[in-house]
Image (cartoon, rainbow, N blue to C red):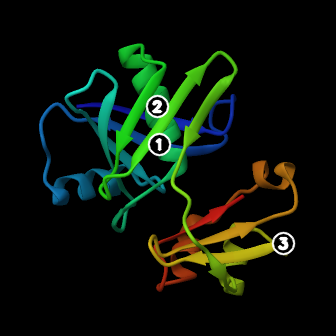
Amino acid sequence: MRTFIIDSFTDRPFKGNPAGVCFLEEPLSDETMQHIAQELNLSETAFIARLDGKNQFSIRFFSPKMEIPLCGHATLASAKAVSYVCGLADVHFRNIQNLDLSVRISKDGISMTFPIYEVHPAEAPPALLAALGLSSVRNVTYNRETNILLLEIATPRELSSLEPDFPALLRSHTSINGVLVT
């Protein structure tokens, strides 16, 4: 199986947000995909397989703990891998919820079209903020469909300098599937 580790949101090696990308030539069981995600030990690993259309792929996301329905940086990494392997500039991924995740690659960068989920005001546990290295956030919201907490911070510079303590982050919550920081 062709497998990549790609750093999203950066142009420098070993920076950004790493994701595993695995090209499936044949179906794998959920258990096997979960074991591969545990072995890679990244926040998410995407498993992609070509569908009927030239630029159509299925995509599934696994953290080391569980399958999750949607992951932005792993979709971005998957698009980069598809561009590299298949030479495609326009890609459509279908996730486990049958959502069309549209990605366009150009010389200026990669743009993605994702669904819009309803969010509700929430609070971030202090242990979660500490694990992310954040002393404050501008806004915290929660989405029920994905069971994900969204944290808005002050600046892109603050975002790019985050160095999360992933083991502490995993210990900081048990009631959500993940956290997004923007």
Q: Secondary structure at mark 1?
A: helix
Whether the residues at callouts 2 and 1 have beta carbons within 8 Å, the answer is yes
- Residue at coordinates 61% horizontally, 19% vertically from top-left? 106
Q: Crowding near pointer 3: few (<14 within 10 Å), some, many (20+)?
A: few
Name above or below for residue 136 compared with residue 99.
below
How far from the left and from the top, in percent, is residue 182?
Answer: 72, 58
Name above or below for residue 94 compared with residue 145.
above
How far from the left and from the top, in percent, is residue 84?
Answer: 44, 18
Name above or below for residue 62 compared with residue 54.
below
| Label number found at residue 75 | 1
Q: Secondary structure at mark 2?
A: helix
Q: Mark 2 or mark 3, which has the lower sequence index?
A: 2
The residue that mark 2 highlights is: 79
Residue type marked 2: Ala
- Residue at coordinates 36% horizontally, 68% vertically from top-left? 65
| Label number found at residue 138 | 3
Quadrant in the rendering for residue 86: top left
Residue type marked 3: Arg
